[in-house]
Image (cartoon, coloured by chain):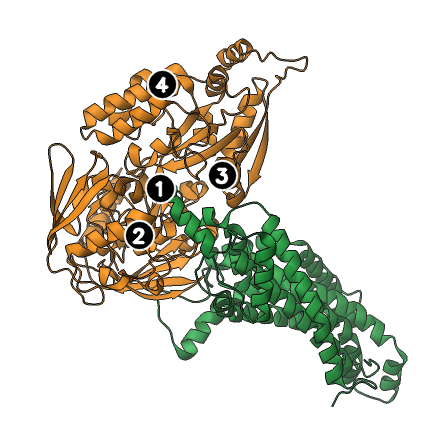
Amino acid sequence: MRTRMMAAFLVTLLATGIAAATPTEPRRGGSAVVAIGSDPETLNLGITTGYAVGAVAASIFSGLVWIDARGEIQPGLATSWTISPDGLSYAFELRRGVRWHDGRAFSAQDVKFTMEQVTGLYHGRFRPAFQNFEAITVTSPQSLKITLKRPYAPLMRLLSVFDCPILPRHVYQGEDITRHSRNNDPVGTGPFKFREWVRGDRLVLERNDAYWDPVYLDRLIFRIIPGAALRVTALEVGEVDQVADFYLPKTDVDRLKRNPNVRLRLGQPIPSMGFMFINARRAPLDNPKVRRALAMAINRVQIVTQAMGNLARPARGPFGDGFKWAFSPESDYDRLYPYNVERANALLDEAGLPRGAGGERPVRLRMVYDAARAPIAAAAAIIRDNLRAVGITVDLQPMDRAVMIERIYTRPDYELTVQTFTSGGDPAIGYHRIYASAASGVPFVNATGHSNQEVDSLLNRAAEVPDRAARGKIYAQVSQILAAEMPTLMLFDEIGVDATRATLRGVWIGAEARDRWDAVWVQK
Amino acid sequence: MVTAGSTPLWRYAAGRLVQAVPLLLGVIVVNFLLISLAPGDPVATLLGEYPAPPEYVAQLRREFGLDQPAPVRLALYAWNVARGELGFSFAYRLPVATLVAGRLGNTLLLMVTALSLAALVGVGLGVTAARRRGSGLDTAATGISLAGYSIPDFWLSQLLVLLFAVFLGWLPAQGIRSVREEYSGLAAALDSARHLILPAAALSFRYMALISRLTRASMLEAMSQDFILAARARGLPERLVLLQHGLRNAALPVVTVIGYNFAFVLAGSALVETVFGWPGVGRLLYDAMLQRDTPVLLGVLLMVSATVVVVNLLTDLLYAALDPRVRY
């Protein structure tokens, strides 16, 4: 007993000592090394949605706003904004005294130029919003107004650096934006300035002392490490300080949890989902009854536990449960489509697909997926096994990403595929493309061939209504149709994991691990 | 000066290089057709995971020349290569020559170190095993060779990282140099050398095994020849007999192995470079395959083919230097 008390005392003392020795105030100096999987194809974040580009360029450029870890919108280059009651007019006051990295003054003209000449034309997420712009009016060097043709609920979210990074008009005006030499040596207003890019090896940024908030790190370095396992090893041995969810193999998370030098952020401030497109162009998948049978034959819990290592939640509806306000209990998969082999068999019998002598049904489906993604491959194998239990044969066809894109989206030649999409912070930004039928044939949109005009028009309305409660009702309506017609079976809501060395402080104040490196500092 | 029978050496070398021209043209055509016929759109892989604006996609296709039929693209490519231009990378938006030049030095450093290591250790092991044939050392050398030949490069690479970087913490796990610290001069060279050890060891292991087996066999054969008996009868010290007479004659197959395996070492370096995050040509090739970066793929494959031609020629010339009986 005495020994135990002494031990408890010592532990308390040690903890107090550590707490006393641990500086809690941010300190200037040092560098952080961030692992990325490949060279960015450019550093002009205004012309691409590529992840590696955002990882680096989000610290070079700034957006009008940024999204915090709770998903709330915070002031960036815009210090305040007013939205008219009809949702058609947005007036912005811009931050004063901001300078570009080359010393020139930032103004509202840069914002107008960026939206009209760069992101509005080339950026995959911002462009659809820009097509709804009526006008951008510069009202003073530090203020501007955007007027819309129709209201667009997620507009403010699309003003972050990842969707509309503000570019310098004095550098790009009158030039070829996509092939400009400064795309590899950019001038921004962000907390770090570009210094060096050795392709295949590293990208080095250095502190921008003129940034409006304090920036602590001397240098922010991006190390290009193509192997997923090696990225984690480099984190464990301290050669890199952070590996974001996008680059972190989930199989290593359990090991990292036990490493005292590594801290993890589990959760998904920006929801994303894994799902199975069902090619409704091909019989018998054109029959909703067959698609509903698949929904009941596939064990989503098994996929979450075995393929995703529990770093996901079984999907509960056409938009998952990542956006609580958009979730509808009436179309809850747990109620409508629980894992039930008997009911799946009955539905398949009803659909006129009886089992043959060997117990197999006359259905053979090709499951096409990206071979490089281990969890997706595991999910595909589970689906094959699940469907075998109801007499359906599935042929797994793993292929490399370039070929997969062609086979699924450009020239659809598949029956089933597992894909993951991020929501981009709002269902209208990232999830509508799963179901809307307008852009069929284009990569990363609805590839099922399923088209329902009512769904399309409800999705359009959901994007226009600013009030969340009202939007929730529209999502409830569209969810019911989608749950009944089942063009796509949602499989899981992902739980993201970002990993960092414990010595790095001030991390993750943004929803994205890629954002707000100005606040990060190194604890010695 | 080495001469080649009745033909001057330079004429022989020039003849071989001229013969290489149709070969390289064939390489261009076959590679171009194979890559063009393979499915997968380079533009779609470049533009992130959101639908890109169709006008931008069309613009990129025009810029990359993908709106032209394959025969036109092939003719244009061959014409550009003839003018010394290897094209423009889709993924990096830089000239292929710039990209390859930036990586070539790193790959050569890795390959030359690995091959030198393989030759030094392999010949040493082979000579020792031959000298003490049937001894425990011979059996151990054979065992090491067998292991070296059987273990895949990428697996060995990962084991080396686990042992020397993770558990022992002696060497860096990845990259070509430290990025947190900024070294210069000798410190920078030492830092690079530390980064070089594991990838070079991983890449060399297989060739070390091969060279040691060959050296052992060639040495055993050479040492049973009459000229060795004569050398010994002349009272030459055993060390001289072994190195000057035995090894020199046994060196031919070893030179062949190094020369003719150059292409395989380059192929192996793609794996090792990827595992160790070594920014070399092999990794450039691997990334280009995933990204369907046709100009980079074609450029690197052409460069590799040209290098193989040159190295094979050098190997043949080295033959003549090593063996006076060889004439061209």
Mark 2 chain: A
Residue type at mark 1 is: Val
In this view, the mark in front (2 or 3): 3
Secondary structure under badge 3? helix
Question: Would you say residue B132 is visible in this rendering?
Answer: no
- Which residue is labeled 3 in the image? A410
Q: Distance between the residues labelled 4 and 2?
A: 36 Å
Q: Distance between the residues labelled 1 and 4?
A: 33 Å
1 or 4: tag closer to the N-terminus: 4
Mark 1 chain: A
Residue B231 is left or right of residue A79, and the answer is: right
Reply above or below: B315 against A317: below
Q: How far apart are marks 2 and 1 (CA)?
A: 27 Å
2 or 3: tag closer to the N-terminus: 2
Mark 4 chain: A
- Which residue is labeled 4 in the image? A481
Identify the image quadrant of residue A141: bottom left
4 or 3: tag closer to the N-terminus: 3
- Which residue is labeled 2 in the image? A46
Q: Specify few, some or many for label 4: CA neighbours under 10 Å numbering under 14, 14-19, or 20 or more.
A: some
- Quarter of the image containing the C terminus of chain A? bottom left
Q: Where is residue B159 in the image (x, y as percent from the top left)?
A: 55, 54
Marks 2 and 4: in contact by CB < 8 Å?
no
Nearest the viewer among B258 and B162 is: B258
Residue type at mark 4 is: Ile
In this view, the mark in front (1 or 4): 4
